[in-house]
């Protein structure tokens, strides 16, 4: 795939297009991609409010008003055991319509009975899925399941919509993603039962991840290599803003159905992209649709006030590569890595098993699989846990989302200076230690707990951005898409588990932070075992990957010395083989 990608990059028409500066045309497409990222973000985190666990107690017949029960009417003091939510004291006499009594003397405090109905505290939210579908007591485990279903939808969407966009165009991928995101969101808001809500969460998950990935790829394919890495990282900024907007909307909309409509219905506005967003020039050329690509390039050149050589615009017979020459939506961030052109190789079926056959690649692959799973688990887990920190849940949530922005800027500024290994290890350890320590802080120091949790989110968000680039450089070129795909699969497993880990706060409040911190610290230490890649010639094949980094100590970090892995040539490869 890499060689065909470079063949496409060297196409004279595309080469001329990518030589354009980051002008008005590129800014226009990138701005539309920002809007796509912004709109796709809220559904990633809206479960914090839609499925928020609410205080509840038993409905006490004869004491509570059947038409308008009051959670804080004081009857719980003598009718319900302290701290109990799912049982009450048994009455001495059954309650009838003709004899309604309510006093301490009417309850046997030595015998408990399960609730038949619940009364919820609606002081914060008038309605959530928990209150409407009674996701309490024996059904409490169904609450985190909604977050897991969303992650399953993301997994399916990344595969299916990514393939659809590679086959039928980026704009078709956007169309399908918008319909799934907007349609699934609105239908979930009118769900008559929780099981339909879960099914719709799966659709919104597929649409959300599809919209972000496809708009990201379309923007990157419209921008020259000079600005590609910067734009690839900075597109995370509107995503963080979109997540924070969910908290802002929740301040004003306290009913889960209307909140779900508010965060998903705006996706339908992006149907306009079918007319106002240009198709990817790179994809068009890879499909042989050169005439359409020429028209887009002409318009971009006019908008930017530059000229494209006339002979390039008129030549429609230039040989073009196959579809494999365009960026793959499923592994788009991985393909930001620059490669040297080479001769095409015959197609061979590749699988993740090949990465596990040799000792070094096996250790590195498993290491990266774990790192991706931890990054996703802790990233979404901290987002879900923001409501359990104490204090103002809306402020905590918004701050937890916005802290991602400085983390992305930090990643971009230090990634080449500190190196991949050093930076990734540092942010994982920083986030892990902050989360772990916060688990031991007394609840009275709420501000300290929130601050440490934000430091944890800063670290894990930075790690999430870095691990994409680092993994793409460690996997050999011929197995890069396979490796990133396997990593992404492990990441989704972490995301599926994240809501359940966050729900452990109802058992022991600091437990989620202790779990997140411990897992992150282990990941940060394991990263030290990986080779540094900054300034190195990247491996193309698995044998080259086996030798890659053999001249580095595990304690080598690019910021601490000038040593680099030597280019892998036949001569030094033979020398290394003899040494081994």
Image (cartoon, rainbow, N blue to C red):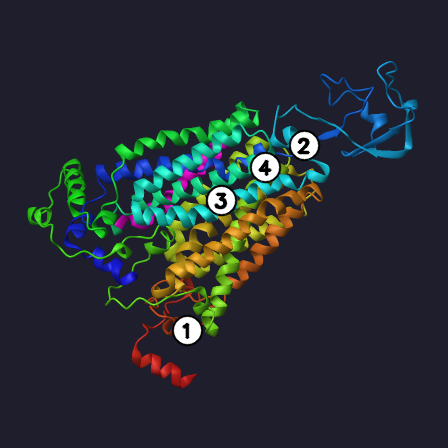
Q: Distance between the residues labelled 4 and 2?
A: 13 Å
Q: Name the residue under label 1.
A: 546
Q: Are marks 3 and 4 in contact (CB under 8 Å)?
A: no
Q: Residue 568 placed where, x, y %?
A: 33, 74
The x and y percentages for residue 139 are: 69, 38
- Marked residue nearer the N-terminal end (1 or 3): 3
Q: Which of marks 1 and 4 is in front?
A: 4
Looking at the picture, does residue 574 appear above or below residue 263? Answer: below
Residue 430 left/right relative to 325: right
Choose top left, top right, bottom left or bottom right for residue 418.
Answer: bottom left
Point out the frontmost of discs 4 and 2.
Answer: 4
Residue beneath disc 4: 195
Place of residue 300 in the rendered image (x, y in percent of width and height, measured from the top left):
18, 39
- Mark 1–mark 2 Cα distance, whole angstroms, equals 55 Å
The residues bearing labels 1 and 3 have C-alpha atoms spaced at a distance of: 35 Å
Mark with earlier residue (4, 2): 2
* Mark carried by residue 536: none
Residue at coordinates 42% horizontally, 61% vertically from top-left? 483
């Amino acid at each position: 795939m890499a060689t065909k990608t470079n063949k496409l990059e060297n196409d004279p028409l595309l080469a001329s297009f990518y030589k354009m500066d980051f002008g008005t045309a590129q800014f226009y497409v990138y701005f539309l991609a920002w809007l796509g990222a912004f709109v796709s973000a809220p559904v990633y985190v809206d479960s914090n409010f839609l499925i928020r666990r609410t205080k509840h107690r038993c409905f006490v017949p004869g004491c509570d008003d059947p038409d308008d029960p009051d959670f804080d009417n004081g009857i719980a003091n003598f009718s319900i055991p302290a701290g109990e939510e799912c049982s009450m004291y048994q009455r001495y006499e059954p309650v009838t319509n003709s004899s309604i009594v309510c006093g301490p003397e009417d309850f046997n405090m030595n015998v408990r009975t399960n609730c038949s109905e619940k009364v919820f505290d609606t002081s914060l939210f008038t309605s959530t899925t928990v209150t409407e579908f009674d996701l309490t007591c024996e059904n409490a485990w169904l609450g985190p399941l909604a977050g897991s279903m969303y992650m399953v939808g993301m997994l399916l969407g990344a595969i299916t919509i990514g393939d659809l966009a590679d086959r039928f165009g980026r704009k078709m991928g956007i169309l399908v993603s918008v319909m799934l995101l907007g349609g699934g969101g609105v239908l979930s808001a009118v769900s008559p039962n929780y099981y339909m809500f879960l099914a719709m969460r799966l659709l919104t998950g597929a649409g959300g991840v599809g919209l972000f990935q496809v708009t990201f790829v379309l923007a990157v394919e419209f921008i020259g290599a000079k600005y590609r890495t910067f734009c690839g990282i900075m597109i995370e900024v509107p995503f963080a803003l979109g997540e924070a907007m969910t908290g802002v909307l929740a301040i004003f909309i306290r009913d889960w159905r209307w909140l779900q409509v508010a965060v998903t219905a705006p996706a339908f506005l992006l149907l306009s992209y079918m007319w106002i967003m240009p198709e990817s020039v790179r994809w068009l050329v890879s499909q042989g649709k050169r005439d359409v690509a020429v028209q887009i390039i002409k318009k971009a050149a006019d908008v930017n006030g530059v000229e494209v050589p006339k002979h390039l615009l008129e030549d429609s017979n230039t040989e073009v590569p196959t579809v494999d020459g365009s960026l793959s939506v499923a592994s788009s961030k991985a393909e930001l890595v620059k490669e040297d052109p080479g001769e095409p190789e015959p197609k061979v079926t590749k699988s993740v098993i090949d990465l596990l056959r040799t000792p070094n690649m096996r250790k590195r692959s498993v290491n990266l699989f774990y790192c991706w799973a931890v990054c996703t688990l802790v990233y979404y887990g901290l987002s879900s846990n923001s409501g359990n920190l104490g204090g103002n849940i809306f402020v905590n949530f918004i701050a937890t989302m916005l802290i991602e922005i400085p983390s992305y800027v930090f990643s971009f500024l230090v990634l080449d200076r500190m190196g991949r290994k050093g930076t990734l290890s540092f942010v994982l350890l920083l986030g892990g230690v902050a989360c772990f320590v916060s688990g031991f802080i007394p609840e009275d120091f709420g501000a300290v707990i929130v601050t440490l949790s934000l430091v944890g989110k800063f670290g894990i968000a930075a790690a999430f951005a870095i691990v994409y680039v680092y993994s793409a450089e460690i996997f050999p070129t011929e197995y890069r898409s396979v490796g990133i795909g396997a990593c992404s699969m492990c990441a989704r497993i972490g995301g599926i588990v994240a809501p359940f880990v966050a729900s452990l706060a109802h058992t022991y409040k600091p437990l989620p932070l202790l779990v997140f911190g411990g897992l992150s610290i282990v990941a940060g230490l394991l990263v030290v075992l990986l080779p540094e890649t900054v300034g190195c010639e990247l491996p193309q094949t698995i044998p080259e990957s086996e030798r890659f980094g053999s001249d580095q100590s595990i304690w080598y970090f690019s910021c601490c010395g000038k040593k680099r892995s030597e280019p892998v040539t036949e001569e030094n490869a033979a020398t290394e083989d003899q040494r081994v």
